[in-house]
Amino acid sequence: MDEHEVTELYMKYIRAFEQKNHAFIADVCRTPFFASSPSGTTIFHDREELVNGFASLRDALDVDGYIGSRINHLKFSSIAKTTGTLHVDFDRMDAEGTAYFNGQALYLFQVAEGGLEIIGIAVLDSTTVSNWTD
């Protein structure tokens, strides 16, 4: 698995998340898609559930004043020829440029017939995807 390709796709994904481009996210995330954290796991079975889940999470962040994400660290690991992970340490930023939340997540990538896809997220704390699991 190519680290540059994974990192490039992740950066496009996070920019789409910031811009509420849920259609792009649904294009690069394979369903069923999972979002797991210590507080639970949510499975998005189809494109509509995935779009609604990301829209719900992203809309909830607007209440907190979220403008974008600052990526502090990315660590890629190739698991197999067709599978890899990307460990992400990030801050959520507000309009003043202040970091108000730090989180970490492990993204799982897989090469499929149509190309590279994100197949799931394991969040490493209980608050990052809480709006998905409430």
Image (cartoon, grey):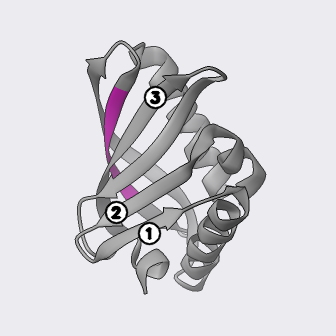
Q: In the image, which residues are magenta?
A: 84-91
Q: Tell me the distance, in whole angstroms, between the alpha carbons under discs 1 and 2.
A: 6 Å
> For the residues marked 1 and 3, what is the alpha-carbon distance in whole angstroms?
19 Å
Residue matched to label 1 = 42
Q: Is residue 106 visible?
A: yes
Q: Amino acid at mark 1?
A: Thr
Residue 74: within the magenta? no
Q: Which residue is mark 2?
A: 36
The N terminus: image quadrant: top left
The answer to which of 28 and 73 lies nearer the viewer is 28
- Please tell me which of labels 1 and 3 falls first in the chain: 1
87 relative to 75, above or below = below
Label 1: few (<14), some (14–19) or many (≥20) C-alpha neighbours in 10 Å: some
Badge 3 amino acid: Gln
Query: Going from the N terminus, do you reach mark 3 or mark 2 first?
Result: 2
Where does the image place residue 44, in percent across and percent down from the top left?
Answer: 56, 62
Q: Which mark is residue 110?
A: 3
Residue 91 in the image: x percent, y percent? Answer: 38, 58
